[in-house]
Image: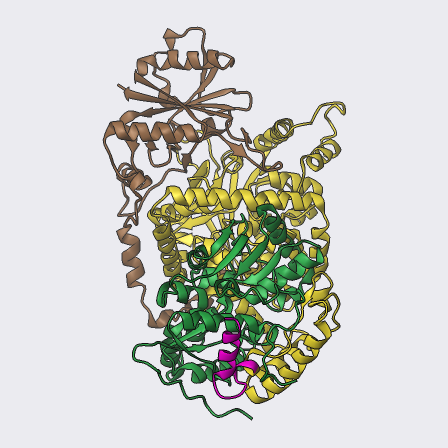
Amino acid sequence: MESTTRDFRENAFEARRDPQLQDALKRLGHGFPLKRRQAAARLPEFERLRDQAREIKDHVLENLDFYLERFEERVTEQGGQVHWATDAEAARQTILEICRKAGAKTVTKSKSMIGEEIAINDFLEDHDVEPIETDLGEYIIQLRHEPPSHIIAPAIHLSMGQVEETFREKHKDLPADRLLDDPEKLLTEARTQLREKFIAADVGLTGANMLIAETGSNVLVTNEGNADLTYSLPRVHIVIASLEKIVPTLEDATAILRVLARSATGQEMSVYTTFCTGPRREGDLDGPDEYHVVLLDNGRSELLGSEFQEMLRCIRCGACLNHCPVYGTVGGHAYGWVYSGPMGAVLIPGLIGIDEAGHLPNASTLCGRCESVCPMRIPLPRMLRAWRARQFERQGTGTAGRWALKAWAFLARRPWAYRRLMGWGVALMGAMGRGRGRFRRLPLASGWTNTRDLAAPEGDTFIQQWHKGPRGDASGERLRRRG
Amino acid sequence: MNAPPEKPLETTAAGRPCVGLFVTCLVDLMRPGVGFAAAELLARAGCDIAVPESQTCCGQPAYNSGDMADTLAIAKATIEAFEGFDYVVAPSGSCAGMLKVHYPEMFKDDAEWGPRAEVFAAKVFELLSFLADVVPLGPADVSWPGKASYHDSCAGLRELGVKAEPRRLLAGVDGLEIVEGEEAERCCGFGGLFCIKYEDISTGMVDVKVDDLVETGAEMVLGGDLGCLMNIAGRLQRRGIAIEARHAAEVLAGMDDLPPIGEPGGDPAPDPARRE
Amino acid sequence: MTARDQILGRLKRGLGRDRRPTDSAEARLAARSAGIIPERGADKSAEEKFSQFAEEAGKVDATLQRIASLTELPAAVADYLAGHNLPKTVRVAPSLENAPWETQPMLERAVGIAVGADTVGLSRAFAGVAETGTLVFLSGPDNPTTVNFLPPTHIAVLRADDLAGSYEQVWARIRAEGGENGGKTQLPRAVNWVTGPSRTADIEQTLLLGAHGPQRLHIVVVDDDT
């Protein structure tokens, strides 16, 4: 997918002025956090389960090679095939090759962020294979040629009216005068449209929330059941997954599943959690004849061993997005690429480079709410700072800002000069602002005063006043004055 | 150009804790009244207070901009200036968090400064939690009738766990009613340089806080961080909403002659010793 | 150099694999220890498990009934269809082929995999998990996966004795019954955990049942399935 992360500021500006989006974000920002809180309250072991999940993933990352090899062995033993792809292009070619060999005309897809990352849909279309998104949200945005705006609820930015408009435009074979005035009718229409496609598809392409080394399985997590129709009806099942998705055992997968849905939507468990292993067995009446797993690197092996390694613990629950005040203000499209929210701000620079994605780690107050809700306890603010440090080294922060910062740091390390200069500065500002107590406009601070008044300083600094005369006297004077 | 290193104040009476007040650059420069309120409260709580003159800034602007070299230098200077005290208290969750949580983190691989930072960090406290948990402030004859809502600043809340303490202290103020906003814990959009670099997003964020405050029916918003309070006050004023903003320390110290943030009110410190 | 070599090579170098044998990972993988099992998943008496299961299943909009034996199943199915105004035809998984269907002559049934026209699917759950009201289905010649997903109504039969407290108990049973092949866990093609009927909130965050999977999930718990 092409990135527009460089335009983050402009994207964010527009997003703030989109009333439809702002309504959707408000709902999301209240609903999901509330549900997560309630789910956590219902499970006394929740905090310990988060710690356990972190431990499992840390262990995996320390032994990623081993678990990937074991996974491959088990898949192959059971008649499946593992393909290794170093980057997006390799993954695309591999998938296309499998589709070609299968004579595939249509491919149903369940939601896959990796699929977005490698832009598989456009690629397949360019090569005369029709990809069909089956997750309702993904289906809607596919019709609209839009990217997802949330990692688990891709169409969250759309209103019912927009969905209706799209269905009327794209489902041309249906009577124009039909009613589509409630979500139920829209769902029924989508369901009917997609049912035939599920049944007719030659290939089913899914992502994987996890891969399990013990059994050579992939785990699929949905509420709709679309993934299950995607892998069980066609002749070929292709799984596309990045390297770090692997976990050792069924018990480990279970441990992580206990914190996944609760963190994402506040459900105890998603409606459908499926463990797929290999092609159909002898005697099975349904199921695919072929099972392929495409393991994608695309930058993960570089993140391993770096200060961003902990980002590889992410299980794509979306909790950080739901709780982030920045995401809640601008939505997912502003981030300009596949991922968004705090996890996007950390991961995107790791995948497409800090120069391209420079805004993202900076567009944060480091409030820490994300880390406080991450089921895998990923230290997101620390990594956002780490990206800022990398940028600083590369001098990517922009000259004006950097100059001001350097000046401040210079003074902060020289108390005598600091006291002098700051003393003059606030005395001046204090004098200017004394009448109104605040500034409506202040050159050099227009970033603030464009939308906020700026309180005027009192005029003397605290330390000046405190140290007036014999040590402690000025303070006593002031305290006494107040009776 | 540095002043000579501070010597810690000697305890004037046995058992009185010796507190180094880390006043914070914002309080020092923009609203010294908060510093005096902090000093008064600490005195009331039975502490001896000193204000090392060599303090400047905790280093957050550099730290949050990725300038590690300057951050480490500032951190070392701060530790040196304050490590002689029994306690180091700051009227700011974000500065206290910087000193208490981030200083040890940044020196963890340093054989000399690592242990020094740990010892130092153990003494650091945010003002309100210090007064609630460490040196009990005790009841005071302070009255401040009105309805106030409390803003939990992010670092104070999430790095230091400050939540109940300010409310407990404020409950002792006669006539003061605290009304909780739904968004009490939501980031106000200050974030240091963030509010300037991403001013439009920051404005969107502070508007959520402002709308929430209006919902509560509060006449005043209180908090423990001046940066947040100036940000919220600035937006309230620009939107023409008559809700005052103050640091909680001012209310606890009964400092009603200090005008609210951003309001004029004559000379707040008519100190004869003051330099013109 | 293949992509596989490149990727694994990079990983091994980065992880210092030449200095760090894989023994502890091997041991961990072989041990397959269960981690923390929450209190709500703890094993309990059969009656307690049933109550918990029924309550949790209800919370996720499944319906549930209990019958004494499989002889009552055809009547239960017929009643359910009548009660929901559904056509009297059922896609039956082979595992339930031998229930006494002749007692319900008005009920049309077809045995085998599901097809697009099917309105109701009837299949057998391998286990239930009281912890969250979850059903566990294993694919196989007796239980085609599509029966669980394609028809808009799904009726699932569960033996009361197959009700477990936690997921871990079910994995242990699956390993035991799967016939471990030299210590290696054998899973069927698909293991489905089903917790309620299909749902989506993708349109203006309005919760709707029946996205692509079944709109209705009815669970029939059987005390005795001989």
| Residue A219 seen in the figure | no
Placement of the N terminus of chain A among the 4 image quadrants: bottom right
Residue at point 66%, 67% (across, down): B265
Q: Position of residue A72 (x, y in %)?
A: 41, 53
Which is more toward the observer, B191 or B179? B179
Is A159 left, or right, of C177 in this rendering? right
Q: Is A482 part of what is drawn in magenta?
A: yes
Image height check: is A330 above or below A465? above
Q: Is A471 part of what is drawn in magenta?
A: yes
Farthest left residue? C45
Is A356 left, or right, of B53 in this rendering? right
Which is more toward the observer, B231 or A90? B231
| Residue A472 seen in the figure | yes
Q: Position of residue A200 (x, y in %)?
A: 59, 31
Q: Which chain is yellow?
A: A
Q: Position of residue B47 (x, y in %)?
A: 38, 75
Q: Quadrant of residue B186?
A: bottom right
Judging from the image, the colouring scheme is by chain
| Total tally of numbered discs in the picture | 0
Residue at point 27%, 36% (across, down): C177
Question: Which colour represents chain B?
Answer: green
Q: Which residues are magenta?
A: A465-483
Q: Which chain is brown?
A: C
Image height check: is B93 above or below A424? above
Q: Position of residue A129 (x, y in %)?
A: 65, 42
Which is more toward the observer, A226 or B216? B216
